[in-house]
Image (cartoon, rainbow, N blue to C red):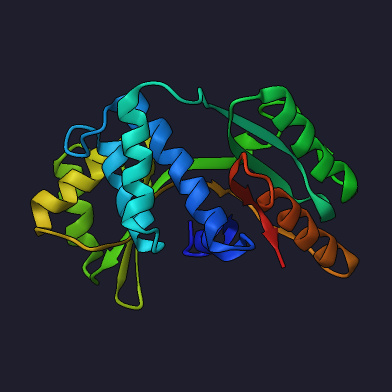
Amino acid sequence: MGRAFQNRKESMAKTAAAKTKVYSKYGREIYVVAKAGGIDPDGNLALRSLIDRAKKDQVPTHVIDKAIDKAKGGGGEDYSPARYEGFGPGNCMVIVECLTDNPNRTFGDVRQCFTKTKAKIGTQGAVSHMFDHSAILVFSGDDEDAVLEALMEADVDVTDVEAEDGKITVFAPHTESFKAKQALIDALGEIEFDVDEIQFVPQTTTPISGDDVEMFEKFLDMLNDLDDVQNVYHNAEL
């Protein structure tokens, strides 16, 4: 699958105009996950992974605690996930993940980003079949055979294991995320994961050049300026 997956998810930390926007997006996601699965990270593995990721992106503890306290109250906004797909500038494939309390507003805002950059929003499933919905775990190591053996012994459905530059990258179906992580910890001891995420990884890439590059960057900026947008995945190769 290649480590280039790291370049194809437009990280909130890299593309958002300000840290406060990053904090807001993490806060919203933590609130939703805690409200749905419980506020105890030991009993809610999705919440634990999300908190770990937030800390890696330097989200302050008070932002995390506030989101969990809000979920504890049981009231507040009722956010639901929404996913939009389409073709961006240069005809690259794009998936936009959102959390919204008003789907009509969010769809209108996302569609405007496509329209204003001469891109085309599609129907559900328009491009997602060309992406693998993968759990991705990256950690220090170089013995990919030992890692693969540990995962197979734990009956984890592994897609790929790669070793490069002193780092091991494990790809597995998104449904196997927690199982794969636990199997690695059981076999190798406590691991510091550089990446512990579920992403849409493109099966192919679309080269973009000329004026399309500037338009594509504008497209990403517009999407990341929307409060409801959590993640943007694409297969553009700049």
Residue 180, x across and y down, in percent: 24, 44
So how many labels did they put on this image?
A: 0
**216 and 142: which one is in front?**
216
Q: Is residue 38 above or below residue 9?
A: above
Rendered image quadrant of residue 177: top left
Residue 227, x across and y down, in percent: 63, 44
**7 and 47: which one is in front?**
47
Residue shown at 30%/28% (left/top)?
72
Rendered image quadrant of residue 175: top left
| 209 displayed left or right of 3 | right
**27 and 172: which one is in front?**
27
Residue 141, x across and y down, in percent: 23, 70
**176 and 65: which one is in front?**
65
| 229 displayed left or right of 88 | left
Residue shown at 62%/48% (left/top)?
232
Residue shown at 35%/78% (left/top)?
165
Q: Is residue 160 visible?
A: no
| 107 displayed left or right of 141 | right
Q: Is residue 203 visible?
A: yes
- Image quadrant where one finds the C terminus: bottom right
